[in-house]
Amino acid sequence: MSIISNENQERNPRGIPKAPFIADVAEFLGADPNPEAALKDFQAALAYSSPSSSAHVQRRKYRYMDQNLTQRRQTLEEKIPEIKKTLSMVEFLQERRDGKSASTEGDLEDDDLEDDDDSASAKALTTTFELNDTLYAEATLEDTDTVYLWLGRTRLRSHRVHAQANVMLSYKLPAAISLLRSKLGAAEKSLSTVVEDLDFLREQITVMEVNTARVYNWDVKRRRELREREAKAGQAKEG
């Protein structure tokens, strides 16, 4: 009778089981109905998972999955603008460097051109950078073909220590642009998948809540009818 334990149950592309709608409660419960067990099964499918629950049990719990995916969505929605901002800055540095290269080539081809130290291409770049959420500092950037990118948290291991730390690596501008575009594409694709899974999950939660209400109402009606039959039987005996 379990609605969530069937291994052949239909699933979405990420393996989230689809909750079947119970059209006929009596047929679902069978000849020896046990509504209490069915309702308990439904609540188990809906409930948040405890930390001690096994992984396969956790994956069956719709609200647990909804909670995890909601957190992942929030993380991605914060991460994507940061990647875009970083990519925009690195692309600007590359465009500025390309512009300087083109200007230098033009100067070499035309011996009559005079040096112009005040030209835009020769000027140092003055900008601000973020120290924390509310504090910025001014900096002058020299012409460079290298940037340093944070790669997030990486697990570090030795024979005695297991730890995680933020890792920064240096990249040439073209390599940094390629990496950031790849990460941006992956993050946007992941966000799209998470949003799709959240929509699917919330549909399943709604179906399970409707199933719960239908089984509960069916049981209330069955108990009322049973009491009425018992009352009529008692009256017949007295008569």
Image: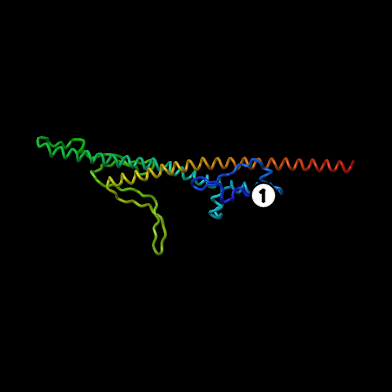
Compared across the picture, whether 25 is left or right of 118 comes to right
Question: Would you call the spot at circle 1 few (<14 residues within 10 Å), some (14-19), or many (20 or more)?
Answer: few
> Picture coordinates of residue 126 (x, y %)?
26, 39
* Most foreground residue, 140 or 74: 74
Above or below residue 200? Residue 6 is: below
> Picture coordinates of residue 221 (x, y %)?
72, 40
> Picture coordinates of residue 179 (x, y %)?
33, 46
> Picture coordinates of residue 73 (x, y %)?
46, 43
* Most foreground residue, 53 or 157: 53
**Labels in figure, total:** 1
* Most foreground residue, 193 or 164: 193
* Most foreground residue, 97 or 138: 97
| Quadrant location, the C terminus | top right
Q: Which residue is mark 1?
A: 37
Residue in the image at 39% along x and 60% along y: 157
Instruction: Give the colour scheme shown.
Output: rainbow
Query: Helix, strand, or loop for circle 1?
Result: helix
Name the residue type under label 1.
Ala
* Quarter location, residue 139: top left
